[in-house]
Image (spheres, rainbow, N blue to C red):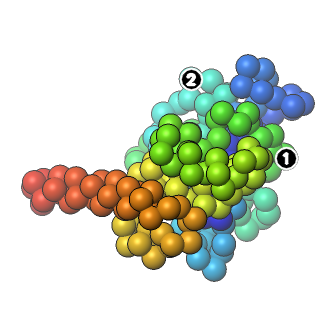
Amino acid sequence: MIRTRVGYAGGTTENPTYRNIGDHSETIQIEYDPTQISYEELLDIFWRSHGAQYRPPSRQYMSAIFYHDEEQRRLAMETKDREEDRLGTKVYTEITPFQGFYLAEGYHQKYRLRNSPNFMNEFHVMYPSDADFIASTAAARVNGYLGGYGSLAALQAEANSLGLSPEATEELLDKVSARENRGSAASDTCPA
């Protein structure tokens, strides 16, 4: 991922906010490098990351894919059909054309990172402006690792490019390593 931002999309209400979302849904905007990950791979992550077979309680929390062109629409529909076949039930994800994105309030951005004071102190120094912090690729990457995404090997490969101090880099490596060790131990105890 190059960067992620959270916000609102899919509705007609102008300038939605968390307190006045109108007919929009809470969404995530993803910028990615197609030479590193394909759109179809992103869709696979999307389907694995939530229970699309459950009807959402409201439009605010609906499952949706907002496509930008015909190829994205085609792939989204194909993967939705594949997910329905895999689950053996209807999937409630809407696949709809992208019509705009409204950035959510700053306190919603990079949630895991914002709740990790040691890392936030470093990012405040790197990005005194909230807009720059929200747009930061490094902040998006660290937020993802803190949220449980990304492997230890991937982090080791990019750790020096994140701009963190040696102490914060070591802390992040330790967190991801511990997560992987917990996952490995759990899979070692599960019957095949």
Residue occupied by mark 2: 57
Q: Residue at x 17, y 52 (%)?
A: 186
For the C terminus, the image quarter is bottom left
> Disc 1 residue type?
Gln
Is label 2 in contact with label 1 (beta carbons under 8 Å)?
A: no
Q: With respect to residue 25, does 143 lie above or below?
A: below
Q: Position of residue 74 (x, y in %)?
A: 68, 63
Residue occupied by mark 1: 99
Secondary element type, mark 1: loop
Q: Residues within 10 Å of mark 1 (few under 14, many from 20)?
A: few
In the displayed image of the protein, which residue is found farthest to the right? 14
Is residue 66 at all visible to an observer of this figure? no
Q: Position of residue 145 (x, y in %)?
A: 46, 56
Q: Residue at x 60, y 61 (%)?
A: 138
Q: Position of residue 35 (x, y in %)?
A: 63, 80
Q: Position of residue 57 (x, y in %)?
A: 56, 23
Q: Residue at x 41, y 72 (%)?
A: 156
> Disc 2 residue type?
Pro
For the N terminus, the image quarter is bottom right
Please tell me how many numbered marks the rendered image carries.
2
Does residue 49 appear left or right of residue 110 in this picture?
A: left
Q: Residue at x 56, y 45 (%)?
A: 120
In the displayed image of the protein, which residue is found farthest to the top? 19
In the displayed image of the protein, which residue is found farthest to the bottom? 35
**Mark sitting earlier along the chain (2/1):** 2
87, 47: nearer the viewer: 47
Q: CA distance from mark 2 to mark 1?
A: 23 Å
Does residue 5 appear left or right of residue 83 in this picture?
A: right
- The disc placed on residue 182 is none
Is residue 104 at all visible to an observer of this figure? yes
115, 186: nearer the viewer: 115
Secondary element type, mark 2: loop
